[in-house]
Image (cartoon, rainbow, N blue to C red):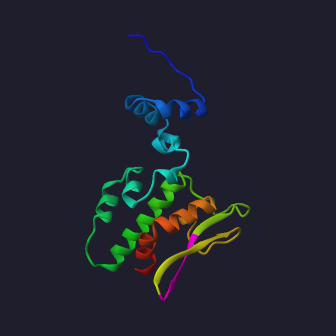
Amino acid sequence: MQITNLQLTDKQAIAWYETATPEVKAILEETYKNRGGKRFFIQDITKQIKTFDDILNFVQLDEDEKFLLNYNGTNKNILSCKYHLKIELIVQVLNNGVECDIMNTTECKYYPWFVVGSSGFSFFNFYYQFSFTLVAGRLCFKTEDLAVFAGQTFELEYNDYLSC
């Protein structure tokens, strides 16, 4: 059996991925696993994500994370960790694995902004900061659009997180 190395640019790999068989997609995802795997090939992640279960399709959880997400008890400390993990996974997937650099004061970081009013908890808008943050850098989005999408799509998850 002869082995041949194939060299592709990122642009060529993305174009090839769109029409590839499931077997070829799996090879490409494995080849690009250090750059996000399957996420590398998705140009607009918001088209693929509609629920938290969709988020879980893009991550590989370790045993501790699986345990935490499956926790159904009433201990507020554990629930707080569970809800925080959910938000971290949402940010990780929507940001394509890129963590905002909290030390970069010239880069905007975006996060959903919520209000509690007479109709209850609801997404209000997004907010951004340059040199300081009101939230942890790991919970920020790299674009305004992603922050708005997360706030609208995952309002329940943010409500759990912020009200626990």
Number of labels in the image equals: 0
Seen in the picture, residue 47 relative to 119 is either above or below; the reply is above
Q: Residue at x 27, y 78 (%)?
A: 74
Res 112 visible: yes
Find residue 23 and report its horizontal and vertical position in percent: 38, 29
Q: Which stretch is magenta?
A: 112-118
Which quarter of the figure has residue 127? Answer: bottom right
Residue 120 vs residue 62, the one in the foreground: 120
Q: Identify the residue shown where x is 41% and y is 64%.
A: 86
Q: Given the current orientation, which residue lies at the most extreme front position?
A: 119
Please state if 137 lies on the left or on the right of 87 as rendered: right
Q: Main secondary structure of the magenta part?
A: strand
Q: Residue at x 32, y 64 (%)?
A: 69
Give how far across and how far down residue 101 sits, in percent: 63, 59
Residue at left offset 31%, top offset 58%: 66
The quadrant of the image that shows the N terminus is top left
Where residue 7 appears, as percent x and y from the top left, is: 56, 23
Q: Residue furthest right?
A: 106
Can residue 35 be seen here? The reply is no
Residue 44 is inside the magenta segment: no
Find the residue positioned furthest to the bottom.
118
In the displayed structure image, the side of residue 143 where residue 19 appears, left or right: left
The quarter of the image holding the C terminus is: bottom left
Residue furthest out toward the top: 1
Nearer-the-camera pick, 118 or 84? 118
Image x and y of residue 34, in percent: 50, 41
